[in-house]
Structures are given as C-alpha cells and as structure tokens.
C-alpha cells in the first residue's frame, strides 16, 4: 500500500508540474502513459486480492481494510489518469484552435459561394479557420461551421464535468459496499440517486450540443465535397459515420453513459472525415493537427463501466440455541419478526396461537420472534435465522427432540412469506446465472459460487455456463456482481428459471 501511495503522490506532482510548463504535448503524453501503467498495475493487484478475499475466508478480516484502502487509491489514480488525459487532449485542442490567424467577424463577403481560384492562403492548424473555406461555401454556412467548432471546447468541458460526477458515483458504490447498517446503506443509495440525476442533466447537455455540432459540421463538409465532386469522400464518410453509430449502439449496453459512448465513436469518425477534407484541400498542417487530436481521443473511449448497485439485504443469520432460564421476560419481550426486503432467510415456525403462549412452554429456545401479519391475525412464532433449507431442517429435527410437536421450516424471499416451501419450489424454480465471456470458469470463481450456494450446479450450454439455482433474484444478483469483480472478462446475467 505504501508503494502505491508514494507513487500516486509523485505522479500527481509530475502531472500537474508538466501541465503547467509544457505546451508541446510530449510531457503531457508521457504523463498519460505513466498514469495508465500505474492504474493497470494497481488494478491487477486489486484483482488478486479480491480473488483471495472470495476464496480464503480465513484471510478476510485482514484483507477487508486493505481492499477498501486500495479501492480508494484506485479511484484517486483513475482521477489522476483522467486529468492527465484531459490535459493532453486540451493541449492538442488548444494547438488545434489557437493558431487561427483570421477571426470569424472578418468574413463579410457575399452570401454565395465564391468560385474564383483559391489564393495561396497561409496554412493554419485549425481546419475550419483556414481561409480556403470562404471560397467553397456561403458566409452563413461558414459562420455556422465555425460556431460548431467553438462548441468543441464546451463539449470537452462538459465531458470532464460528467466524469467528475461519475467518479462520485463510483465512490458511493464503494461506500455502499462498505457500510454495515441498512440505514447507512439507504442513505448512500439516496445520495447516489441525487448524483446520478445531476450527471444525467450534464449528459443531456452533452448530447444536445454534440448532435448539433455533428450535424452542422457534416452538412458543411458534405456541401464542400459535393462542390469538389468528391463522391468517393462522401461515400466513405457516410460508411464510417454509419458504422460509428452501430458500434456505439453495441458498446453502450455496458457503458454508464450512452451519450459518451456515441461521442467517442462518432467523434473518431468525424475526425477521420475532417482529415479527408484537409487532404482534398491540401491543408497538411490542419491534417497533422487533426491526426494528433484523433490519436489523443483514442486513448480514452469514454465507455465508463456502469455503476451497478446490487441491493444488500443485511440479513442476520442466527443459529438455534437453548438458553435456560429463558432470556425473554416482561422487560425483554420476544420481538416482532423482522421482515427483510431483499434476500432469502429460513426460520422454523414452532406454532400458530390464538393467544400468546407461556414463556416456559418455549423451553428456552432462542432467538424467537413472532408476528400476527399472517395466518388470519393469529400469532405465529418463529425461531432462528438460517442460510439454507438444510440448516432449517437440522433445527427441525433438534426441536422435535426437545418435545415440539410440529416445527415447520418456512422462508422469506425478498420480503414474501413462504409457509409451504415444497409447494413454492414446485411453482417457482428460482434464478440462474448465465456466465459468458470466458472459455473456462476458474477454480476461484467456482469456489466463491459454492461458498455462497453450497448446492449450486454448474452446466454448459454452447459457450455459456449456467449456474443455479438461487431462491431469489437478489441472491443471484449478489453472486453475479461478486464474480464479475473477481474476473473482468466475465459477463454474468441473472435469468428466471422457466
């Protein structure tokens, strides 16, 4: 941990020092490469420790705090990487735009495209600020094109704003996994919803600005290529832009933001189109600048992983005990049965009574609870809180030895009371996890699944692995999220068993 903390501090110093001093981009590019290498190294270490945490229960107490600390460092380092990349892209964009020698308001010519021979204008890095454009489109179209160019910086600024909100969402996701009470977890979820709402507003603004910019630029470039009779360029641009939309649609399923995913693919395609336009107009300086911007953009595809929250149940599993004399008194009465909204818990129903039973008749068993919510308002008494039906059945056998006549295993699945488990199982087959993205399941993943569900069955259908069966959707989702965290190549989808 000390090694990563020290390197993180050093890297922060290097990134911001170089950002302030260098404008040629070389130092900024090196910063991006350093940050990426460090982030990859830390993520590799995290994956190793997560695997240990999942497969070696005896180490969990020691690993828990280390994992939380390293998750925090990974988040910080991701921020360093994002800022380094943003500095590099901003520098390239600045070089791309700052070399313009002719401001927009100087163009006041006729509102028709000029047809005279193009003079030997100076070549500038910003494509649309080359004076060549005034010879191929009207002043109004040129003005629209240059207004679109100004929006590039606004969109980049909004993207960085969105990513800051995204980092907060990731931090809240980690916090949700760390808290140990239901109240604290609900508070984190409420805050996450708020941050996600703000991020959604920024995302919408990015989408609106980007679509307007993209449409205006493509219209202008199409008009210019038509005048130059370059059908080949028009055709290839249309193919690439259409492909970019398809790629974005395929990619966005795993991305937190569909807008940023689309921006990455379409922006790359648009930059390619602009490079072709620069070639046609013989503007090599502008093309070189565009290539550098495109190279910088490809370092980050903005397809940030979805922030997924698997709702936690905070179920307290309590074994059956006998304590004499009983711990329950008038000052410490038997509590109401706690109903968990998420997850599965098994208990043993020891009886249904019109009147509350005498405490001495309960033979010192604990933990007891009761409710009049079911069975027509009568008092149903339960004991224990078990992970599986097998554990509950062991408790049933023990209670019969103590003299209880008809102890009955029951269960709650995501808040639903199941008084007849066999009947419920015949109608509700449960949930499976469908795993793809890997040719084999590692021993660590299999061990973790078995740890969560000792009766889990593994099978293979085509290229997918099917793991089941889980009683509740929330149980299956929890295991699915944990194995994805163990192996980033895995894709896990929870499906109802029909």
Image: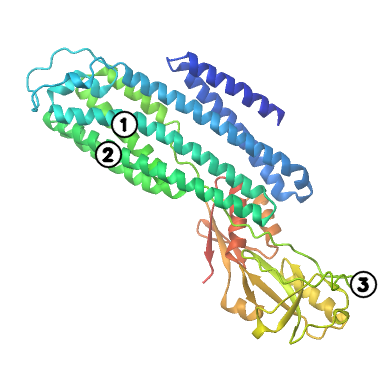
| Residue 21 located left or right of residue 43 | left
Contact check, label 1 and label 3, Cβ < 8 Å: no
Q: Do labels 2 and 1 touch, CB within 8 Å?
A: yes
Q: Measuring 45% from the left and 38% from the top, which residue is drawn there?
A: 162
Q: Residues within 10 Å of mark 2 (few under 14, many from 20)?
A: few
Quadrant housing the N terminus: top right
Q: Quadrant of residue 207?
A: top left
Q: Position of residue 247 (x, y in %)?
A: 36, 44
Element at label 2: helix
Residue bearing the label numbered 3: 324
In-front residue for pair 253/243: 253
What residue is disc 2 on? 212
Q: Of marks 3 and 2, which one's residue comes earlier in the chain?
A: 2
The residue tagged 1 is 151
Q: CA distance from mark 1 to mark 3?
A: 76 Å
Label located before the other in sequence (2 or 1):
1
> In the rendering, at what x and y percent does residue 95 appear?
36, 18
Q: Residues within 10 Å of mark 1 (few under 14, many from 20)?
A: some
Measure how far apart labels 3 and 2 are at the Cα level. 76 Å
* Residue 486, x across and y down, in percent: 62, 47
Q: Is residue 145 visible?
A: yes
Q: Quadrant of residue 406?
A: bottom right
């Amino acid at each position: 941990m000390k090694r990563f903390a020290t390197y993180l501090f050093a890297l922060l110093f290097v990134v911001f020092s170089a950002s302030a001093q260098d404008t040629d981009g070389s130092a900024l590019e090196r910063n991006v490469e350093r940050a990426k290498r460090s982030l990859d190294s830390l993520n590799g270490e995290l994956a190793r420790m997560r695997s240990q945490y999942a497969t070696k229960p005896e180490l969990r107490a020691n690993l828990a705090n280390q994992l939380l600390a390293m998750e925090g460092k990974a988040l910080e380092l991701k921020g360093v990487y994002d800022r380094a990349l943003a500095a590099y892209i901003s520098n390239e964009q600045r070089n791309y735009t700052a070399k313009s020698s002719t401001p927009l308001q100087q163009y006041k010519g006729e509102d028709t495209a000029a047809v005279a021979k193009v003079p030997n204008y100076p070549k500038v890095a910003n494509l649309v600020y080359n004076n060549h454009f005034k010879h191929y489109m009207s002043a109004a179209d040129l003005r629209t094109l240059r207004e679109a160019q100004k929006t590039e910086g606004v969109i980049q600024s909004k993207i960085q704003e969105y990513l800051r909100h995204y980092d907060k969402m990731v931090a809240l996701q980690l916090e949700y996994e760390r808290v140990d009470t239901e109240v604290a977890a609900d508070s984190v979820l409420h805050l996450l919803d708020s941050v996600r709402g703000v991020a959604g507003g920024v995302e919408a603004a990015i989408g609106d600005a980007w679509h307007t910019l993209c449409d205006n630029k493509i219209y202008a470039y199409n008009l210019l290529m038509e005048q130059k009779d370059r059908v080949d360029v028009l055709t290839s641009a249309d193919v690439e832009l259409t492909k970019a939309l398809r790629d974005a649609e395929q990619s966005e399923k795993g991305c937190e933001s569909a807008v940023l995913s689309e921006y990455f693919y379409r922006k790359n395609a648009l930059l390619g189109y602009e490079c072709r336009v620069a070639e046609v107009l013989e503007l090599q300086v502008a093309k070189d600048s565009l290539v550098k911007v495109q190279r910088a953009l490809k370092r980050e595809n903005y397809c940030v992983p979805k922030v997924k929250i698997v709702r936690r149940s905070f179920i307290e599993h309590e074994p059956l005990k006998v304590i004499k004399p009983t711990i329950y008194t008038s000052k410490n009465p038997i509590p109401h049965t706690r109903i968990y909204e998420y997850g599965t818990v098994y208990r043993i129903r020891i009886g249904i009574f019109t009147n509350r039973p005498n405490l001495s008749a309960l033979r010192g068993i604990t933990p007891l609870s009761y409710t009049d919510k079911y069975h027509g308002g009568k008092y149903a008494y339960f004991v224990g809180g078990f992970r599986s039906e097998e554990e509950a059945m062991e408790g049933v056998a023990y209670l019969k030895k103590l003299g209880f006549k008809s102890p009955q295993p029951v269960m709650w699945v995501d808040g639903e009371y199941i008084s007849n488990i066999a009947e419920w199982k015949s109608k509700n087959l449960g949930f499976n996890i469908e795993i793809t993205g890997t040719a084999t399941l590692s021993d660590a993943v299999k061990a973790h699944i078995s740890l969560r569900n000792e009766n889990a069955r593994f099978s293979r259908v085509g290229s997918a692995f099917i793991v089941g069966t889980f009683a509740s959707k929330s149980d299956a989702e929890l295991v699915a999220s944990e194995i994805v965290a163990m192996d980033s190549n895995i894709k896990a989808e929870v499906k109802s068993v029909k």
